[in-house]
Amino acid sequence: MVKRMDRRKVLAVLAGGLVLGVGAAVTLASWNDDEVATGDFTAGEFVFQGSSDGTTFTDHATGDAPGELSFETGADTLSPGDVVYEAYALKLTGDYDADLAATAPAETGTIAEDLAYGAVATTAFGCDAAAFAGGSAVPTTIASGQTINLCLQVTAEDSIEQGDTGTVTWQWVAESK
């Protein structure tokens, strides 16, 4: 009879332990909690454009479709010592300021070695000898929303020969900060 009673006690203890274990598991589960956060992201914008009239800005990112410069009368009949001017404006829009650099003008044709170049920044759009003389150095930075008016100068050197022809391409590079 002792064995039967011991068996009942063992079963009762096991049953109690099972109930206690389930209760403990439920209690532990009630102390777990989660926290979740999410964020949305969008890339910023960066647009660098040029204008040959100072008001209409267009993206000319490759040499395939450059901004057209119309140098003053005389650019098509240069002789040694002649100087011609043309205005061009640069504008940056978007979310970032940028470092600004000009590359050396790229030349093609027989006139390539016979021209010298200069550029200054001016306060207003327009370009002639007076604007070039009163201009300042071309900035090395450009702020978002800023327009930089440039005055480009081309001088025919003494080495120019009759009938020389060619094309000159200016390029400016803006790199976001």
Image: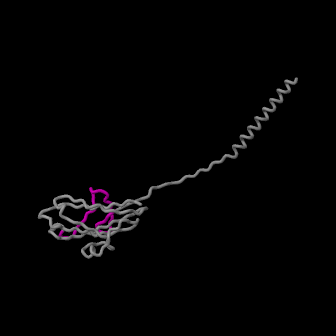
Look at the magenta stretch and give its main secondary structure. loop
Q: Nearer the viewer, residue 166 or 103?
A: 103
What residue appears at the point 76 percent right and 35 percent down from the top-left corner?
A: 18
Q: Looking at the figure, which quarter contains the C terminus?
A: bottom left
- Tell me if residue 59 is in the magenta stretch: yes
Q: Which residue is drawn at 61% across and 50% down?
A: 35
The region drawn magenta spans 49-74
State the residue at coordinates (74%, 37%): 21
Provide residue 124's location: percent of width, then percent of height: 32, 73
From this view, report whether residue 39 is shown above or below residue 147.
above
**Is residue 39 positioned above or below 135 on the image?**
above
Side (left or right) of 32 relative to 153: right
Tell me the quadrant of the picture where the N terminus can be found. Answer: top right
Does the stretch in magenta take in 50?
A: yes
Q: 155 or 34: which is nearer to us?
A: 155
Q: Is residue 67 left or right of residue 160?
A: right
Q: Where is residue 171 in the image (x, y as percent from the top left)?
A: 29, 61
Tell me residue 33's x, y (percent): 65, 48
Q: Residue furthest front?
A: 158
Which image quadrant is residue 93 in? Answer: bottom left
Front in this rendered view, residue 63 or 140: 140
Up-down: is 64 above or below 28?
below
